[in-house]
Structures are given as structure tokens and as C-alpha cells.
Image (cartoon, coloured by chain):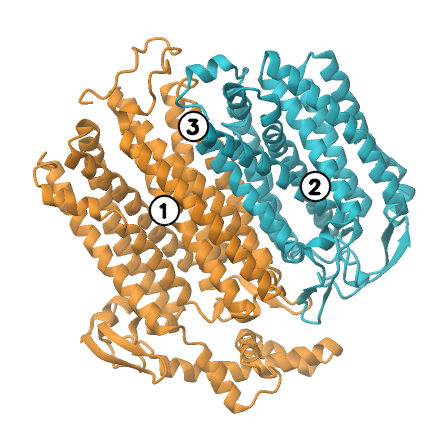
Amino acid sequence: MDVVALSRLQFGLTALYHFLFVPLTLGLAILLVIMEVVYVTTGKTIWRDMVKFWGLLFGINFVMGVATGITMEFQFGTNWAYYSHYVGDVFGAPLAIEGLMAFFLEATFVGMFFFGWDRLSKIQHLFVTCMVAMGTNLSALWILIANGWMQHPVGARFDMATMSMQVSDFSAVLMNPNAQDKFVHTVAAGYCVGAMFMMSISAIYLLMGRHRAVALRSMTVAASFGLASSLAVVSLGDASGFTIAQDQPMKMAAIEGMWNTEPSPAGFNIIGFPDQMNHVTNDAVNIPWALGLIATHSTDTPIAGINQLVQQNALRVASGAQAYAAMETLRTNPKDAAVLAIFNAHVNDLGYGLLLETVGADASKPTPAQIAEAAWQTVPPVTTVFWSFRFMVVLGFYFIALFAVMFYKACARRLDTTRWLLWVTAFSLPLPWLAAELGWTTAEVGRQPWTIDGILPTALSVSSVPALNVAISIAGFVIAYSALFVVEMFLMIRAIRKGPGQVHGPSGLVKTIPGFAAPSHAPAE
Amino acid sequence: MNEYEVFRVIWWALLGVLLIGLAVMDGFDLGAAMLMPFIGKSDTERRVVINTVGPVWEGNQVWLILGGGAIFAAWPMLYAVSFSGFYFAILLLLLSLILRPVGFKYRSKLQEKKWRNFWDGALFIGGLVPALVYGVAFGNVLRGVPFSFDDTLRMTYTGSLLGLFNPFALLCGIISVTMLVMHGGAYVACKTEGAIRRRAQTAATFAGILVIVLFAAAGFWATRLNGYVLQSFAGTDGPSNMLLKTVSLAPGGLMTNYHTAPLILAVPAVAFLGAIATILLTRAAKWPGITFIASAFSVAGIIGTAGVSLFPFMLPSSSTPNDSLIVWDTSSSLLTLQIMLVATIIFLPIILLYTSWIYYMLRGPVTTATITRDDHTAY
């Protein structure tokens, strides 16, 4: 493999691994706030025990998120140096503000969450928990503003003197509709993960007949929160699909496996087998009208097919080649007004011109065959995007159904009467993670061949490091991350086995606060 | 002074603030982790040392993440060149930094002696390696590293990992380690009592003496090194393009700024005076808080010395000096620097405010008694 493939592999692996921990942090943080509010308002100590127990699991998970998150930030510099230089002016700011506004908040307060029980008043501790939850969610906001800009780069222009993208309108970067939709969709996905985590583990306790009081209460909270979250994640995903159809028509067409423009409203391929070589989707089962309604929220807006989009992109590649040629002339003779006019007329297609370099062409004077080849580069791997999207959507609807049933059972106070349902719930534990990872796969594989959509090809974004170095660092990460995963799972399972009653042990945690009785364990333990 | 120049200088100074913030705040975590196996004679004593930083290290580590983000946003080319050029050094840093959070969190979850000893070793390495890598990186920045650009500003780096561990850089690495041991010792002395405090004070004293000797040696060595001198450039408000200037090499070039502005000699002076004060105050064994502040000044002085010696250089190229990164051709656009400054002005005071509140709530020493009492909740 070359350095581009290896760098992508490393980024993909470390990002997907990092995102095993992030969504649970996002979801559990909110659930901790909910449970602690109940504790503070009712004064019932079982709710404090629940916050401590789920908080313990939150802490084991949080550490992994932090440890793997640093890798993500540094990796832009180590492995994507040209990218970092080319878009750092725009892309770096949200990351830096994330640190200032969000990560400092969550990381500073999270220590107090664990060590503050006997130093803080109830209200102060609730405040600390709220700050942690706010920090994690704000953190997601800024990361998705950065990611949204990669998908839909607004508010920036190319500056030839520095060979980089520069911010022209920062509020456009912040208010990027793509970023806003992705933010709410992603945090809602995190809430589903948190809710399922709490509900599944509670189901295991009920099946084992242990910790009944804590499990029932946790399950009620998780089922209600999970129902709201799963409804949100699906409907907000729909909103996200709407913006993709506007801003990234190629990604939408790939998700659909739709090679040719259909008369509106277009049908939705519910199943099919995309064949990227021959530009067809075989054995497609098509639901008439559905895609047109989903993607455009109308019946008369056409949706472009891949073949038609490639034809359009071929024009942009040719235009980008003119911009590239003009840029080379201007580099030796910056005062040439005629060439500058050509450059300015074609600069918006410069990224498509750069695609020519990825197919081995001279970007300033490509042949028609090279232009066609570069235009076909703009099609992402259709099969991957097609199937990861479908599995994600199916899982989304499954979550709504499961949370709805459990919510009904909770309202009827019959959560533990149907054992097979508890088994189903227990075995559903990994599914929200799977859905979240599939979501990222759809979004980021669907963005190919670009790191910044239409601006900078992935193949040109990498650092000038030897492929061997990247292979070695991948090996290092795989070994370290696998070892960590084993340790993390071991501690997580051990803590779950011990259960809520054991969390704070026999210590005199609360005796320093006047007015508190001795720590009362959950009554049913 | 034009506006772009002002903002570039502000962001140069803020980079210094962030690096000093990292060294002062996260530095004492690293120092405490390095000292822990030596000044903690029993398991409970080791836990005392770990729990002095237990509730705060996560927040402190954000200085590193913020530093990375701020360099990315304000100095994109510096971020791109240094991180990809120092590839394996960064990998080493990342892998050792991963040891630290899991070590803190997981060490005391099991009783077994082997388990705890393993994580003690991991925590020691997680303190030592980052401290060493930071210092080695500074040494290389002062000497320059081999890189060059083509006309699309794509960088090629021609050095190796072993090349980073040259004698001068290694000396800087050892200074960084001793400096953070001194600083960590001063911190642990603040937060403990009795035998552990005395051992921490002894460690801080010895480390302080080493800091003074080694820092002086590095300073003397630096006068002999080739330094970089800016001959011509596109102006302090020129575009951030590294190909528009000429740079020459001159023996003792790192001393140029001290000749043109002797006042900045105050910066290395602070480094020495801070270390001397740390030693004297730990000997006096009173006012541990003030001792910690003196140590922090020394840390700030040492990092500041590297900065003012290099200015306006940020990362010189030893192979193609003309392609060096300087303050006037490495920054983001004026608009980005302005936006980032606004964000910093809003959020940095808020961060300092809630961080102070946390430290206030955590005031008072960690003792073997508190560890025994909170056996199940402490690290």
C-alpha cells in the first residue's frame, strides 16, 4: 500500500476506535444529569447510588475517549501535513475553540465529579455534573463544525499567495447547515448509545435477579430517554439527508446506488448490488417516489444520477485545469492581468483540477482521456456507502421500536415480566455502536475522493513521510489500542459484575457533610 | 507597526503562554508521575502522590490539546512541518501519553501487587517520555531541522528519528526532565505532609541544582552553535509564504537578540532566579505554595528563553535556511488571528476562573489517612 492508503487506513481505524467511546460519553453524561436531578430534588439516596454506579462506568469509558482523542488531533499534523497547511486557517479554528470552550470544561470538571462527593454540596455537585455534560456536548458541536466544513466548505476562499484556503466569512462556517444537521444527528446517536448501554445492563441485572431497585429505575430513565433520542436520531438523520442532497449530490447518488437521473420524484432502491465497474446497480428493489420525497421534501425536484454528475464534474475538471495552468503562469509573472482574469474565473474549480494530479496527469495541460478519468474519480466507493447507510437506517428504526416497547413496559410498571424481551434488550447492547460507526462510514467514505469536498483531494492531503513510517505507526496504534481495549473491557465487566452496591464501599464518604445519615445502600440490595 | 504584525506578535506570545501553561500545569503531573515510584515507599504512599494530581490531571492535559489546536489554527505551517517532521517523536509522545490516563484510572482498581507495580512503571514512563520528548523537540527547534518546500508549499522532511536525538537536543531533553521533576516535587510538597513531603522537597532541591547547572551549560553551548539570521523578507505584513526570504547562518546567531535588546536577558535571568528561589525555599521548608510559584517562574523563564532567542524564527530549516518558518510568514490570515484572539479573550479567563474554583475546593493535603478512608474512590 502507498502512503495515501496507509494514512487513510490509520485515520479510519483510529477515528472509528475513538468513536467507540465518544458516543457513550455523550449519552451517559446527559443521563447522569437526569439521575442526579432526581436525587437532588427527591433526596432519595438510591438515585445518588445510581449516579455513582453509572458514573463509575462513565469514568472508565471517558478515560479511553480522552486518550484516543489526542491521537485524532495530532494526526492531522503527523499524517495530513499538506491538508493542515492548506486548510488550517479555516479548519484549525474550530478545533482550537473546542479546546478553549468545551474540552477544558469537561476535563476540568470530570475530576470533581468523582472526587467531589464529600467536598461539595448537593447543588454544587449537580453543577459539576452539568458542566461535564455541557462540555461533552459543546465539544461535539465544534468537532462537527470542523467536519461539516470538510463536507461543505463554506465561508472560505483560495489564496494563491499562501497556497491555502482562508476564512472569508466565519459566521458562515459556524452556521453551516451541514454542520448543524450533523451535530444534532450525531449527539442524538450518542444519546441512543448511552440509553441502550444503561437499558441493556439493567436488563442483564433483572435477568440475573440482582440489583432490582437500581435496574428498574435505570431502565425507566433509559427507555424514556432512548425513545426520545432514537426518534430524534432518525428524523434528524432525515434532515441531514436533505442537506446532503443539496450540497453533496454525488454522495446522495452513491447512497442510492442511482446511476442515472430519474424523472422526479425518484424511487428509492431499498436493496440492490451496485457494480462500480459497469456503472449499474443490479437486482434493485425500488420503492417509487420515496427518494424524491426524502431527499428533496418535494415531488418535482429532480435528483441527479452518478453518470450525469460525472459529466458535470468533467466540465469542472477541465475548468480546474485552466485555473491550475493560470496559477503556474502567475507564479512566475504575478502581474499578468489577463491570466489573473482567467484564474479568477476558474478558481472555484481548482480542486477538480488538482484531481488530475491524482491520476498522474499534468494538471495544467490534461488530455481528454485524463479529464474523463479524473471525473470518474469523483465517485465514492458506491457499495460501501450504499450498504452502510441501509444497515444504519434499519438499526435506527429497530431502536425506535425497542425503546418504544420498553417505554410502554416502564409506564405499565411491568419491565421485568417478559423475560425474552429482556434477553433481546441485553443482546441489543452493541447495536447502537454499530449504527454509529456505520453512520461515520457513510459520511466519510461518501466524501471521497476529497478531504475537503471539491477543494482538496485526499491523495494530495498527506504528509511527505515514507509509507514505512505510517505502517509502523499503524502497528504501534493497533498494539496499544488492542491492549487498552482488553484492559478496558476487563475493568468494565468487573465493575458491572460488582454492581451498584459496591461502588462506594464502606468508606465514610458522606459523614463529613453534616445532616447526612450514614450511606444507605440501595434498599433492595 | 501594522495590524497584521501586531496580531502575529500577539499570537507568537500566546503560543508562549500556551506552552508555559502546559509546562506549569501539566508539567507538575509529569513530574509527580516520575517521582512517584521513588518518593512513595509503600503502596499507600504511592497512592498519596498519585492522588495529589488525581482530580486535576485531566484538566491539565487539555493545555496540550489546546496548544495543538492553537498551533493548528494560528500557525498552520508550523503545525504541519513539526508534527509530520517529528513523526516518530510524536508517536512516542502519543503512546506514552495514553499510558498516563489509563494508569491513573486503572492502577488502584485491583489489589494485586503485580498489577499495581505494572501501572506504576507505566505511569513513570508516561511522565518521563513526554518530558523528554518536549525538551528534545525544543533542542531541535533551536538547532533547526532539515526540511524544504516546493513551489506549491508541499514540505519534504529529510531528517530521521535518530537525527532528532543529537547531543544538544538530548541536553535540552534532560533539562526538561529535571525542570519538571523540580516542579513536580514542589507541587507534591504543597499537597502532602510528613515523610512524603520531605522526600519531595529533597527531590526538588537536587533537581533544581541540576536545572541551574544544565541550563547554564546549554546556554554556553548555544553561544557556540550556528544560529539563523534573517537577511531579507517580504515584510511583517507579508503573505504567509516561506519562499520569499533569505536567511544566513552565523556562529552565535542565537545570541543576536540579546545584543540588539539586552533587556530580554531578564528572561533567562528569571529561569535562574526561579530555580535558585525554589532550592532556597524548599531548604527553608516553609511556604510550599510560594515555592511552587518560584518553580513555575523558572519553568516559564526556561521556555521563554528558547522563544526570545529564536525570534522571529519559529522553526529554522537546517538544510534550506531560506525555507525556515518565521513569525512573518507562517501565521494564519489576519481574520483568523483576530477571531481566535476574541475566542481566547472570552474563554481563557473563564477557564482560569473555574480551574481556580476546582483547586480551591480541593485545597488541603492528601495524606495516607485520606487514602485509607477513601480506599474505594481514590485512584
How far is mark 3 from mark 2, CA to CA?
43 Å
The tag earlier along the polypeptide, 3 or 2, is: 2
| Image position of B107 (left or right of B339) | left
Percent from the top left, x then y, of residue A518? 30, 11
- Residue located 37% across and 70% down the image: A251
Q: Colour of chain A?
A: orange
Between circles 3 and 2, the one closer to the viewer is: 3
For the residue labelled by badge 3, is the local secondary structure a helix, a strand or a loop?
loop
Whole-angstrom CA distance, mark 1 to mark 2, is 34 Å
Q: State which chain disc 2 sits on.
A: B
Give how far apart the Cα atoms at labels 1 and 3 are.
Answer: 32 Å
| Depth order, front residue of A226/A309 | A226
Farthest residue to the bottom: give it: A368
Labels 1 and 3 in the same subunit = no
Q: Which residue is tagged 1?
A: A23
The residue drawn where x is 55% and y is 15% is: B365
Whether B55 is drawn above or below A370: the answer is above
**Residue A438 relative to residue B359: left or right:** left
- Residue depicted at 67% across the width and 41% down the height: B132
Judging from the image, what is the letter of the chain drawn in cyan? B
- Which residue is disc 2 drawn over? B16
